[in-house]
Image: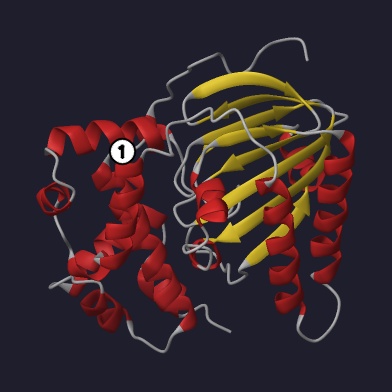
Amino acid sequence: MENLWYYPDMKPDVASIPRFALYGEDLGEHFEELVHCETIASRSRRYDWEIAPHRHPALCQMLLLGSGSVDLLLAGHGSQRIGPVLIVAPEGVIHGFHFSRDAQGYVVTLSEKFVREFADDNVLAELLSHADVLSFDVETASRLSAVAQQILFAATGGARPELLRRALAEAFIRIAAEVSGDDVGTHCDTLVQQFQKLVQQHLRRQRKLGFYAQALNCTERTLSRRVHGALGVSPGQYLNDRIAAEATRLLRFTNASCNDVADELGFVDPSYFSRFYTRMTGRRPSAVRGSEG
């Protein structure tokens, strides 16, 4: 590539960074898969091989670049990489790519619900919570590519493809966990990991920043600095992203009404919930609720 698109330690304007389900798909759109796989080319070609900086509130992505090169922004750090590499972008971490036109590989997307299944496995949980770039030999790259291809093919085969995709995704993660990475971000910050766990536990109680700071035995300023350093967003922005993602899940996949969802997530005023959700996703909750089936 002629120019380095993302410069080292580039700090994007967080307020301008979009939030997506999959890239280019807003948070209110249908996304029920625990595991999703697609080729790098299938989406990147549509955008002239440039995936602008963005983040996913409730998805972790593992991008396997088998060949070709990429200008990369990950957790505020820019670099150029040549395949084979595996790029891990955990939930909420800002990332963007500019691929060479000969880039080949796969993007494996894991739902936050699926990632939580590995919470008790320290090795896998650590891998999925780090913003990281893993380099490996051709043999390991071939193993990962073979599994990713099977995940992709499983999307159209059999009566229960989701079960197969989950098993294959776990195999993919375990192969990746055998390789040490560059640890390009600070997402592995233990305080931030504890904050994320607390947010998940108290997501439906509308806790304020002071609650989390006290629970983590730190000041609000320290928590804000550490979360922003690891995720590129403030604690409040991270929390709002997670609430919006959970609201979408409840609206899409349960029988709860819009008022029920508002109550479930701790909103005293349903109209305030409606304004909040519209601001966060660009869609009214009633439109998401009404688009089921």
x and y percentages locating residue 52 in the rendered image = 59, 33
User: Which structural element holds mark 1?
Assistant: helix
Q: Quadrant of the C terminus?
A: bottom right
Left or right: where 204 falls relative to 177: left
x and y percentages locating residue 187 in the rendered image = 43, 38
x and y percentages locating residue 131 in the rendered image = 52, 37
Residue at the outermost bottom position: 255
Left or right: where 132 falls relative to 101: left
Residue under the image location 39 percent in, 35 percent down: 230
Residue under the image location 46 percent in, 47 percent down: 19
> What residue is pinned by disc 1?
227
125 above or below 104? below
Q: Which amino acid type is shown beneath numbered disc 1?
A: Val
Q: Nearer the viewer, residue 146 or 73?
A: 146
Q: Nearer the viewer, residue 260 or 179?
A: 179
Q: Nearer the viewer, residue 46 or 5?
A: 5
24 above or below 69? below
Q: Quadrant of residue 191?
A: top left
Left or right: where 117 falls relative to 142: left
x and y percentages locating residue 222 in the rendered image = 18, 33
State whether residue 222 appears in this view.
Answer: yes
Residue under the image location 41 percent in, 77 percent down: 251
